[in-house]
Amino acid sequence: MNKLLTIIIVFALSLTETNAQEWQSVALSNSITHPQPMTGLVLWPEEAENRFDTYGQSIQLEFAYCLPCKVVTGCADDGTIQYNWTWFENILSDVASRGHQLIARFRYEYPSGTDVDGQKGTTAVPEYIKSRKDYHETYAKNPNNDGPTYYADWSCKELQRFTLQFYSDFAQQYANDPRLAFLEVGFGHWSEYHIYGTKLEFGINFPTKDFQKEFFLHMSNVMTQIPWLVSIDAADDEYSPILFDNELMALSFGLFDDSFMHKDHEIGSSDGYNEECWNAIGKLTRWQQGVCGGEISYYSAKDQKDFLNPSGMYGHTWEEQAAKYHITFMIANDAPRGSYGTAARFREASMASGYRMVVKQCLTNGSTTRLLVTNEGIAPLYRDAYFAIGDVRSTESLKGLIPGTEKWVEIAAPADATKLHIVSDCILEQQEIEFEANTEGISTGISQTSVSAETSAEPSYYNLAGQRLAKPQKGIVIQRQNEQSHYMTIK
């Protein structure tokens, strides 16, 4: 027999044997019952603790300003920054004790803030820098009517070096800590990228644009595991170089808006500054890679208390605005003090944010399980999570699955609806990422009816990486007992 013909026959027989294990549809029924980890409305730790009995199950996240001076003890002669992380550890552990994760924002300036030393407006710059002869802070008595404020001295080279090194050390310390969800960064008042009411002086009370670029590129290099966000005010080219720098705009940072849903937020209502910032720095697609969040406005005393009104506030509902800006989280600390901010409404509003994983198909061949997964939320999941059967994880992460898209994930284990779940090393043990499913098929074992692994009303084809194919790749058509065809890729 011709040697080439022999090889072809052997290959065909082996392929037929491989396909003898028919893919079977598996029945799944599952529901999403609570806000998902790393999403939803957010309280500060004190409020979360005080209201835990009522609101503890309605939130997943807490927010805190954090102070570099509380964790830095000095600097060695060789330039090594010396730390005692106990202060920050206590915050993380306190928040985690309630089954929640922390959103942290380290800052230097806080008008009227007394949390550094009891005096109003003291910066959170580490003491070893403040004691240097080449370090000189400036002061404003009442900028923008926010009260006394001292400003970090950006002419000091050690402050610049420390700022970069601090985030390198922070990333090394906390990159894989499930107690920390997200990190917000920036400069100026509250690290919100402005010093309104004070004259802007680059290299004195605000970092130069050259240093800012160095900072953002550095963050992109070191903060590869922890999603990090910048204020939408960084779209203001008076303060920031980002908007007209293609290299910076290409970075995958997220955005936070600390006056979300205020009266003049939207274009068409007064100046629409906030929406203009979102559009400029977000380019309408930043949310696909960077987390979007913020804080409900304090422009009016009633904004936080009324934004959960199902009928809306200033002509817009929470659900509408959350979807428009692809919001993953939003600080709403004063909302429980309003008539609309009930625990039930918190839960409902939180579940209207972030991701929502749905299994559309579940197939098994007896040894392997394939799931067709879609995201029916309003934002991606920004950290790794995996479907698993028991202890066996899928090889494909759910991270980055854009709402309205779908992908196949494969688990090297037979289907078992009782053991199918989502696992993540980025959440707490007390937390659970849920999924929704309502698929038809066998509940256990293997039935006589087989289906294609890519069967749908309008046939779609995927590779095992979960990527949709424009048309079937070159392959061999295998005729099934039920007369359906299945394309098997030849690699």
Image (cartoon, rainbow, N blue to C red):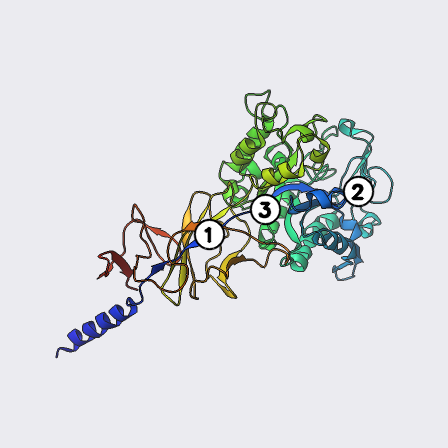
Residue under the point 32% across and 49% down: 456
Q: Quadrant of the C terminus?
A: bottom left
Q: Is residue 126 left or right of residue 327?
A: right
Q: Which residue is mark 3?
A: 34
Q: Which mark is residue 123?
A: 2
Q: Secondary structure at mark 1?
A: strand
Q: Determine whether 127 is above or below 145 in the image.
A: below
> At x 70% / y 53%, what residue is drawn?
96
Instruction: Please provide percent x and percent y for residue 403.
Output: 46, 43
CA neighbours of label 1 inside 10 A, class few (<14), some (14 to 19), many (20+): few
Check whether the beta carbons of the residues at disc 3 and disc 1 lie within 8 A of each other.
Answer: no
Instruction: Report how far apart the C-alphas of labels 3 and 1 lie in the structure.
Output: 16 Å
Along the polypeptide, which appears first: circle 3 or circle 1? 1
The residue under label 1 is 29
- Residue 36 visible in the snapshot: yes
Give the number of callouts: 3
Where is 153 relative to 237, above or below? Answer: below
Horizontal side of residue 38 vs 129, given as left or right: left
**Distance of mark 2 from mark 3, alpha carbons?**
39 Å
Amino acid, disc 1: Ser
| Mark 2 Cα-neighbour bin, 10 Å: few <14, some 14–19, many ≥20 | many
Helix, strand, or loop for circle 2?
A: loop
**What is the x, y in percent for residue 269?**
58, 21
Give the mark nearest the N terminus, 2 or 1.
1
Q: Which of the 4 image quarters holds residue 444?
A: bottom left
Residue type at mark 2? Answer: Thr
Observer-side mark, 2 or 3, equals 3
